[in-house]
Image: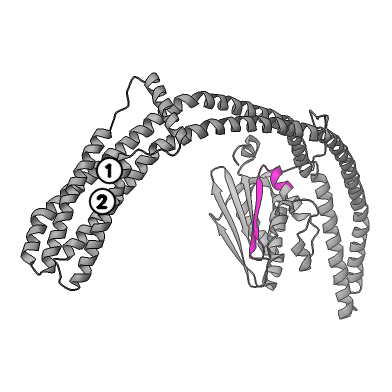
Amino acid sequence: MKLKSKLFLSYLFLIILFSFSLLWLVIETRELTTSLRGHVQQDVHSIIEVSHQLQSLEDLYVNYISLFISSKAANKKIGQVEKYRKAFDKNWKNLKFRIETPYHKAWYDKVLNRIYIFIYNTISSRREYDYSKEIDELTQKVDQRWLRTNEAVKKSIYYLKRNRLDDAKYIRDVRVKGNVKKLRESLTGLNKIIGERGIKKSTELAMIAQKTQWVIFSAEAVIILVILLAAFIGARLLTKPVDALKTAIGQVAVQNFDIKIKNKSNDEIGELGTAFEQLCSRLKESETYKSTMLSQFTHEMKAPLGSIKQAVRLLETSFSDGLSKDQKRFFSIVKENNESLQKLITNILHSASYDSGKVRLSYSSVNIVKLITQVCVNLAPTIKQKAIKVNLNFAANEIFCEVDQDKMKEVFQNLINNAVKFSNENTVIDVTIAEKIALLTIIIKDQGIGIPKKEIPYIFEKLYRASNSKKISVKGTGLGLYISSQIIRAHGGRIHVESELGKGTIFKITLPRTKNVAEEGGWLT
């Protein structure tokens, strides 16, 4: 079966299951939610209105008390009190009517209400508690106390308008304050009872809804599990060949072309796996042919270059007294280019021998501090020419490590030389050696041109050179970092690079202190 057919059938099956289950749940929960909302909506609105009524009472009382604090703008303040008093009276009449008259949003709410009460009384040993008596009593108390408060406020305002301040204060202290306090308590109690009824109804109806929906939720859980299982199996069947192909690509990235993809499917991904195996086979043949040709070419080049070097040396010795300044410069150019070619050939030969991953090492106890110092001394002319400052930060004067001295010297030569080549004038290079139990860490940090972020994963590949190194015309073969990484890995170590374009590069080398530690493994993790 083709991959597109598999995907189509898988998605179709999942969509049908999900749509059916979702539609079922929506229909059932809609009815339950609507009924539940209708039962508690009235109490919620009542609680809000009572709270507003309490706030309105406080506003009325504050403005009423302010009449006795200052006589300024007395008429305006009396007008505000009258405004709040009339507003409270109007709002309370509306609220009382709403509390005493049950409200249903639609006719089916009444039917559902009776059905749910019947179901609740059937499945529960408890009976619904009736709060209507307490609410009626509190409503009557609020009504009576408001009438007294309203009359007292109007009478005290009457005395204030006629400048009978003592009579007005008497009414305030004896009748208004006490009635307002009792009215506040009655409104608070009414709010509390309505809230308790709302909570009780919500709890009871939620329990009914829970008991009527548990079958639906159980069915939904089963359907979801089936969907997840089907999705997992389908994804596993579809992605298993892709994972195998991804692993194979990762092997090619580290120059391993012996690729055999197992469990290839009989679809387009399987065909792609077969094509990839054929590609790897051809790449292996090409890589073998290239390595053979390079080795043969470099071997053939060594003899002529050696002869040229010897001939130039003899000519320079024979005519040393009679050479002009230009002739000496030409001899120097020939010798310099001959040495560059010999170094290039040596690097190519080394890289060819390192391709198999089997680097021959001659271990000895080496003072790494001394080795790095020697490398820096050898590079002193170039360092001095660019006015670069090299900071050597060592934990001790002697730090020994079991390594192949010549090969490790080549690593430090490559890395420090690169740091110098790619650094601007008057910058700083930091070389740090730190010890940690069985490991040694060497950090080489420069302030050079840096490496583009997207190119960092490729800098240890053979013959690879960063794009910005070509722009500044720095000579190189692209073999130094490849050889260095192979030598470090052969020692059981790791090399890591961090770089920011235009700000510099940090190379971090981690080495086992002894050959036994390197062979034991596990320390680097």
Q: Which of the pair 290/451 is nearer the observer?
A: 451
Q: Is residue 367 magenta?
A: no
Q: Secondary structure at mark 2?
A: helix
Residue at point 37%, 21% (across, down): 121
Q: Residues within 10 Å of mark 1 (few under 14, many from 20)?
A: many
The C terminus lies in quadrant: top right
**Which label is found at residue 316?**
none
Q: Is residue 196 left or right of residue 313?
A: left
Graded by Cα atoms within 10 Å as few (under 14), some (14 to 19) or many (20 or more), the crowding at tag 2 reads many
The magenta stretch spans residue 489: yes
Instruction: Decide: is 365 above or below 13.
Output: below
Work out whether residue 350 or residue 292 is closer to the camera in this orientation and state it.
292
Give the magenta-colored segment's residue range. 486-506
Residue 320 can be seen, yes or no: no
Task: Please determine whether, in this image, residue 43 is positioned above or below residue 240.
Answer: below
What's the amino acid at mark 1?
Answer: Asn
Helix or strand or loop: what does disc 1 sit on?
helix
Quarter of the figure with residue 116: top left
Residue at the location (32% across, 27% down)?
128
First along the sequence among labels 2 and 1 = 2
Q: Is residue 463 left or right of residue 210?
A: right
Name the residue tied to disc 2.
Answer: 54
Q: Quadrant of the N terminus?
A: top right
Horizontal arrangement in the rendering, residue 108 relative to residue 288 (left or right) = left
Give how far across and how far down residue 199 sits, in percent. Answer: 34, 36
Residue 65: image x %, image y %?
A: 16, 62
The reply to whether callout 2 and callout 1 are in contact (CB within 8 Å) is yes
Residue 457 coordinates in the image, percent (x, y): 71, 51
Q: Which residue is mark 1?
A: 191
User: In whole angstroms, how far apart are the C-alphas of marks 2 and 1?
Assistant: 9 Å
Q: Nearer the viewer, residue 379 or 18?
A: 18
